[in-house]
Amino acid sequence: MKENNEKIAALTAYDYTFAKLMDKAGIDLLLIGDSAANVIAGRETTIPMTMDEMIYHSRAVVRGASNAFIVADMPFMSYQESREKALHNAGRLMKEGHVEGVKIEGGQEIAATVESITEIGIPVLGHLGLTPQSIHALGGYGVQATEKETAQQLRDDALALEDAGAFGIVFEEIPSGLAEEVTNSLSIPTIGIGAGNQCDGQILVAYDMLGMNEEFSPKFLREYSNLSGYIKEAVSQYCEDVKKGNYPSEKESFF
């Protein structure tokens, strides 16, 4: 798609129903994100996500999607401890979760691990910029690689991931000019989230772009619907109908 100048449309998915709908709508790539820790489990960060939880969500998504390329996040401490553990856990996501690739956060420090995983036939998607698993080290959420030194490090990290065999890289919350420059320097595609429109593709958290997270409105987010409003309205009407005895009606009852 990069070679053909065709943009890649990607979204997160965590369950069968949403995956099936997004797949039918023509999404190119579905990411089973460890962001499930936030939007599904209500946790403050992605750090508590476990391998077993990622496998559970992966199985559900795979059952719903038959066309999209499906990638799952490697959760915190599933790959940092050792290369052997990273290989084992990447294999679990493929073998037990039935996904088609894994995503790993980090640059040069995990390039050797990425190389080891790709060497055994597992596609790896990199992730640079704002890396949520390192949120405490980064000092919070915000735009990354804004200084000369950090921008150069991102360039070097991206090249290291490409050399290690990554099939693409997610750029999260970095200056658009830097994202464009690095995208043009790589032979592998980049997928942006808060990184401008010159990346080879874009990804958003599905719950955010559907307007289901009323407390989250970063600058890069475009809401394509207001499902939170529709859902609350529908549930409110249901409650009213039940309490007034209007549901179920005679038509909706068995005799």
Image: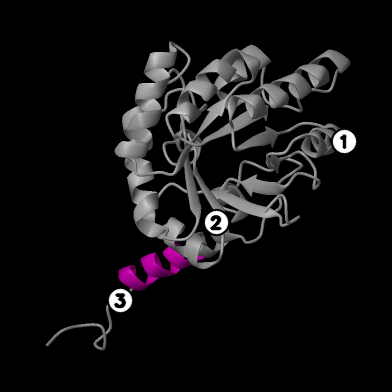
Q: Which numbered mark, 2 or 1, is in the foreground of this view? A: 1
- Residue drawn 37% across the image and 55% down it: 16
The residue labelled by disc 1 is 177
Numbered tag placed on residue 228 in the rendering: 2
Q: Which of 14/224 is in front?
A: 14
| Amino acid type assigned to the residue bearing label 3 in the image | Tyr
From this viewpoint, is residue 147 visible? yes
Answer few, some or many: residues within 10 Å of disc 2's Cα (few below 14, many 20 plus, some between 14 and 19): some
Do the numbered discs 2 and 1 sit on residues whose CB atoms are within 8 Å?
no
Q: What is the C-alpha distance between the residues marked 1 and 3?
A: 56 Å
**Does residue 69 appear left or right of residue 168 in this picture?**
left
Numbered tag placed on residue 247 in the rendering: 3
Answer few, some or many: residues within 10 Å of disc 3's Cα (few below 14, many 20 plus, some between 14 and 19): some
Q: Is residue 109 above or below residue 233?
A: above
Residue 246 forms part of the magenta stretch = no
Q: Is residue 80 above or below residue 176?
A: above
Measured as percent of width and height from the top left, residue 152 is found at 82, 18
Q: Secondary structure at mark 2?
A: helix
- Residue drawn 41% across the image and 28% down it: 49
Range of magenta residues: 233-243
Q: Which numbered mark, 1 or 3, is in the foreground of this view? A: 1
| Amino acid type assigned to the residue bearing label 1 in the image | Gly
| Amino acid type assigned to the residue bearing label 2 in the image | Ser
Do the numbered discs 1 and 3 sit on residues whose CB atoms are within 8 Å?
no
Query: Magenta-highlighted stretch: main secondary structure?
Result: helix
**Does residue 131 appear left or right of residue 84 in this picture?**
right
Here the colouring is one colour
Measured as percent of width and height from the top left, residue 95 is found at 31, 38
Q: Quadrant of the image for the C terminus? A: bottom left
Going from N to C along the chain, the mark reached first, 2 or 1, is: 1
Q: What is the tally of numbered marks visible in this picture?
A: 3
Measured as percent of width and height from the top left, residue 100 is found at 44, 44
